[in-house]
Amino acid sequence: MFLPRSAHGHAISMRARSTSCYFVAFASILTVCVEAAICADPDRQTRTVVELSEKQLHHLFPELAGLKSADTQTDLPMILQHVGANEDAFLRNIPNLTAREEIVVQQQVHAEIGGPDHTFPVFSGKYTYLVLAHRESDGVRLVEYRTDLKGKEIKPGLDGAPASTQGFALVALLFDTFDQTLATFRYLGRQVVDHGEMYVVAFAQRPDGAQLTGQINIGGKTTSTAYQGIAWIDPVKFQIRQMRTDLLEPRPDVGLLAQTTEVHLMEVHLPRVPTPLWLPGSVVVSSLYNGQLVRNRHNYHNYQRFVANSRIVPTN
């Protein structure tokens, strides 16, 4: 769900193939790598997060600290049914949206032998964030944009930033009813997060059938990748409150060794929208790309409907 782009024109994007349900155009950019990322595990090529032992889960995902592990998968169908219904409603009801976006890009530099690594900011900016919903005969086509504060479209890749990212409003659609049929799920249990107990569900797309996939183009080489991750779900509203995604497998063939994205969603109420929308409030995207660790931090606020008298000014 992200489109990474470097100063050398390397790009990573998220795409969705056309289906009878809908077509989603994702854009997204080089994502997250943490020391405990699952894609760094030597067994990664044969195991996904839904297949790991409890010990492996806690080792690779420190954010699962305090998890009360599930004894059975009895609750999983009920959870997926309710979450899928919410994501289907999101797709039906989402209008054209605009918000303010603040971005800080950090880069990690390895220190001399024996010394600590250093992370320092290399870029920051303020933008207008747009999600446009195009209603078509076979469903909805969603496209995400970034513009400067004067309305001029910013192409993926930010001048002065080693990598940039976008496309987060659509991440939870990995749990909509249609895409659930193209992935494997596992109920991990319950965990207290932000003073509330959440359902915790792991997922892994099936690479042979996933519709929401990442397209990577680096140095003229193009390849696709699927995703896996963990979602924390409100047990009352059955809304995804936060989500982590990782590459289904590393792509050393194009220099992308690890990708993790952590999205925190917030409830947004808008006029004439029949249901609340759960949209990104903050996002941390880190990537390990050709040995370089880059972290993008995004904050969103002031979501509004994108009105007809507003316009995007295309770049030359």
Image: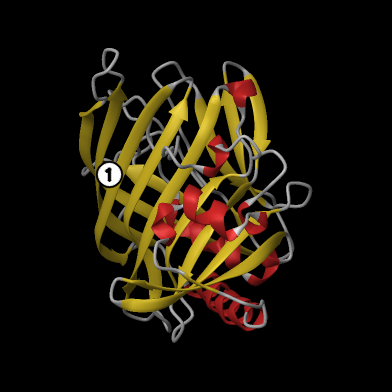
Please tell me which residue is depicted at 27% across the width and 25% down the height of the picture: 117
The image position of residue 289, as x and y in percent, is 47, 25
- At a point 66% along the width and 65% down the height, the residue shown is 185
In depth, the one of 166 and 132 nearer the eye is: 166
User: In the visual, does 208 lie left or right of 158?
Assistant: right
Q: Is residue 135 visible?
A: no
Please give the name of the residue rendered at 21% of the width and 35% of the height, measured from the top-left corner.
Answer: 124
Residue drawn at (50%, 57%), measured in percent from left and top? Answer: 171
Q: Position of residue 254 (x, y in %)?
A: 60, 22
Q: Secondary structure under badge 1?
A: loop
Which residue was labeled with disc 1? Answer: 151
Instruction: Give the image quarter of residue 263.
Output: bottom left
| Residue toward you, 40 or 311 | 40
Q: Position of residue 167 (x, y in %)?
A: 45, 49
Looking at the image, residue 291 lies above or below residue 294: above
Residue 225 visible: yes
